[in-house]
Image: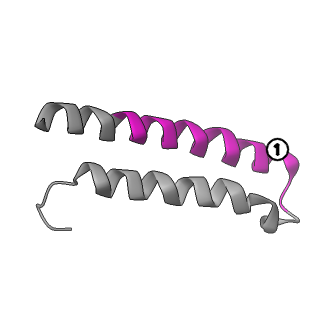
Amino acid sequence: MNNQELSSNDIEYIADMLRAVVWAKDDLLPVSTETLVDIEVSLSKAEAALRRAAAELRRMSA
């Protein structure tokens, strides 16, 4: 990995990809319901945290 910093747009892109995985999680069948719930909860929290980080970066660079 290079030493370039992630921009707020990069972070939002990653958050978008996490949302896409949550959206498509039901295609992972026959994965257990417990695992699907874990995926949804974990990735949704990660997405929200990344969106907050992107917003903070934008505020700091303004």
User: Where 1 falls versus 48 (above or below)?
Assistant: below
Residue stretch in magenta: 31-52
Measured as percent of width and height from the top left, residue 4 is found at 12, 61
User: Where 34 falls versus 2 (above or below)?
Assistant: above
Q: Which residue, as the protein is rendered here, is positioned at the far front?
A: 62
Q: Residue at x 63, y 60 (%)?
A: 21
User: Where 25 falls versus 61 (above or below)?
Assistant: below
Judging by the rendered image, the residue that carries numbered circle 1 is: 34
Local secondary structure at mark 1: helix
Q: Quadrant of residue 24?
A: bottom right
Q: Residue at x 59, y 41 (%)?
A: 44
Q: What is the count of numbered marks?
A: 1
User: Could you tell whether 21 is left or right of 37 in the image?
Assistant: left
User: Could you tell whether 26 is left or right of 59 in the image?
Assistant: right
Measured as percent of width and height from the top left, residue 12 is found at 39, 51
User: Could you tell whether 11 is left or right of 24 in the image?
Assistant: left
How many other residues sit within 10 Å of disc 1, few (<14), some (14-19) or many (≥20)? few
Characterize the magenta stretch by its predominant secondary structure. Answer: helix
Q: Quadrant of residue 55?
A: top left
Measured as percent of width and height from the top left, residue 19 is found at 58, 53
Q: Residue at x 22, y 38 (%)?
A: 57
Residue 3 highlighted magenta (yes or no): no
Name the amino acid, label 1.
Glu
Check the picture and name the quadrant holding the C terminus: top left
